[in-house]
Image (cartoon, rainbow, N blue to C red):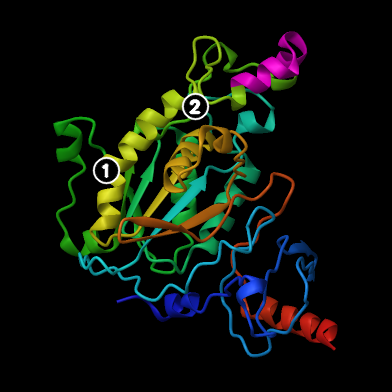
Amino acid sequence: MISSGFHEFNRSLQLYNHANDSNPHNVYAICPPFVRKGFDYDIRLFRKPICSIRNYRPSFICATPQASIKDHIAPISHLNSDGSKNPSIETALILIRHGESMWNEKNLFTGSVDVPLTRRGIEEAIEAGKRICNIPLDFVYTSALIRSQMTAVLALTQHRCKKVPIIMHNCSKQAEAWSQIYSDEAKKQSFPVIRAWQLNERMYGELQGLNKQEIAERYGKEQVHEWRRSYDIPPPEGESLQMCYQRAVGYFKEHIEPQLQSGKHVMVAAHANSLRCIIMYLEELTSCEVINLELSTGVPLLYIYKEGSFMKRGSPVGPSETGVYALTRARIFYLSIGLMFFDH
């Protein structure tokens, strides 16, 4: 059974298409995200008319500058964690790019180099955990790199179910045997965290460890942009996004999608490019569309899987924006007061 907190989560704000909506009290969009300043919040609305939400009790919202009004999704009503294979059930898929790493902070090409999080990255991971704390989870997947593992574990410490994240060691039979859990109760109270190198960041070859600005000055901005954003052109001795797609999406199809099909809820903590590839698959993006897809560090993205299809609940947030994924009752009250003022 899902906790009562998750039933509150189901009372989501929907985004409506103005052309097809006859109810003048529906909220069309609340975006860009709320920006916190002390104890106050800047509330900016886009898309008129401005309207009241006095008759609504929302507890969840994900509206971002990139979200289209047409990208509305029906309320989640059938999510469960009982392992049922009923094709009509809906399961949750959470994608999180790791928090800021020490080489992100230094503006260095990181790629496959195993670099930990900064203090800010740790805070981003914890904040991401707070935003997804009411969404049921059964399995957690990360890359083999420490920054994604730190992000996943820190986020899970905030989950309201209070389960313990346990890193699975399956690199050898001896490692599996030595990490065996013999208590059924302990198993029930844990999140298995499965690591996979296939979810690693794109390997940047000879660019790894070099400063991005210095490389742009040496080779030109256009050349560096081509290495970073083209689909099929790799950097020197590195991987193209297309090559990354083959391993990341291949692993997703073989290992993660079957979990969703069986009724399990999954979180994936990985990297900008491996997640871009997975999103390309989920949203059926073209090679031209995916190169413009930006993912901010530490911002969770939610998809709902049902009957073989993935429904988008959230869009990537621009790097200059402060993402807000969930609303507390206090924020909703503040919002409703502001909207009532504008509505009159």
Quarter the N terminus occupies: bottom left
SS class, disc 2:
helix
Which tag is nearer the camera, tag 1 or tag 2?
Answer: 2
Q: Which residue is mark 2?
A: 241
Crowd rating for badge 2 (residues with CA inside 10 Å; few <14, some 14–19, many 20+): many
Q: Nearer the viewer, residue 257 or 290?
A: 290
The residue under label 1 is which amino acid type?
His
Task: Find residue 37 and report its horizontal and vertical position in percent.
Answer: 81, 63
Give the answer, above or below, for where 64 lies relative to 275.
Answer: below
Give the answer, above or below, for where 88 lies relative to 256.
Answer: below
Which quadrant of the figure has residue 102? top right
Residue at mark 1 to residue at mark 2: CA–CA distance = 21 Å
Task: Find residue 42 and report its horizontal and vertical position in percent.
Answer: 81, 67
Q: Are marks 1 and 2 in contact (CB under 8 Å)?
A: no
The residue under label 2 is which amino acid type?
Leu
Residue 167 seen: no
Q: Which residues are magenta?
A: 214-227
Residue 142 seen: yes
- Per the rendering, the mark at residue 255 is 1
User: Magenta stretch mostly in which secondary structure?
Assistant: helix
Q: Is residue 171 magenta?
A: no
SS class, disc 1:
helix
Q: Residue at x 26, y 53 (%)?
A: 259
Q: Residue furthest front?
A: 19
Task: Find residue 198 and report its horizontal and vertical position in percent.
Answer: 36, 31
On screen, residue 81 versus residue 337, left or right, reads left
Q: Residue at x 50, y 67 (%)?
A: 73
Task: Find residue 187 and report its horizontal and vertical position in percent.
Answer: 22, 59
